[in-house]
Amino acid sequence: MERVVIYGGTGGIGLATARALRARGAALHLVGRDSERLERAAAELGETGFTAGDVTDPALFPRVADEVGDRLGGLVYAVGTIQLAPVAKLDPARIEADFRINALGAFLAVQAAVPALKASVAAGAGEGSAGVVLFSTVAAAQGFSHHASVAMAKGAVEGLALSLAAELAPAIRVNVVAPSLTRTPLAESITRNATLASGIASMHALQRLGEPEDVAALAAFLVSPEAGYVTGQVIGVDGGRSSLRTKG
């Protein structure tokens, strides 16, 4: 398996995905804001390069493409936000920030990576061997209060993925993972409250919150050639919350 780029590679889900991919033998290139955390992750994983930068900076994406080189087996954009607020509290700046980080960043990451992904396929990896994985949220499929901004941004990610999956086929596959609340540093403001976390867990058929490894297992599969016949899909890793109601 050729090199995989992971944006958000030191975050909860991004780092768990990196570990899962290294276990499959993939070389990696991590992208994140904190160079020290990137260096530690690269040392832990082995066969891992990294680029420090912010996904709100459009110049980051061609820089990553230059540093990765002309052959690339996959891309994971594991970057997200959790800005929960009622409509009355949302202003254009907050909404634009959610969109830029979640949706525009995903587009720019894929756009910059397409030449190297196609080069990998053309070099003999085979049609559909190159995989792209983007991230949405259960809140894009279910209506949750105070989720208007993030649900709107992640809904855009789902639409983007479907369009890209059609346009880039058959060479490149594009899929979306849509988790429910997962115990990551990004979600700590919610999950550190034991009562709140327990209440949210009880809303899931499986009666628990997600762990980064739950999400990473699917992301690593989807980006790998093993998922060579899977594209254009939005797949929930959500304990059943998007589709099951076990009470009432």
Image: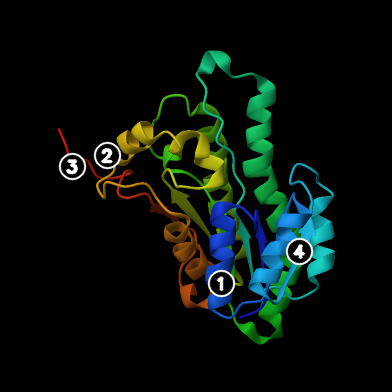
Quadrant assignment for the N terminus: bottom right
Determine the secondary structure under disc 2: loop
Q: What's the CA distance linking mark 2 and mark 1?
A: 31 Å
Q: Amino acid at mark 1?
A: Leu
Give the mark, 3 or 2, whose residue is nearer the N terminus: 2
Mark 1 sits on what residue?
Answer: 21
Question: Which one is in front, 20 or 93?
Answer: 20
Q: How many marks?
A: 4
Can residue 40 be seen? yes
Q: Amino acid at mark 4?
A: Phe
Mark 3 sits on what residue?
Answer: 246
Q: Amino acid at mark 2?
A: Ser
Please identify the residue farthest to the bottom as the structure is shown: 124
- Rendered view: 204 above or below 130: above
User: Any mark on residue 50, and which?
Assistant: 4
Q: Amino acid at mark 3?
A: Thr
Q: What's the CA distance linking mark 1 and mark 3?
A: 34 Å
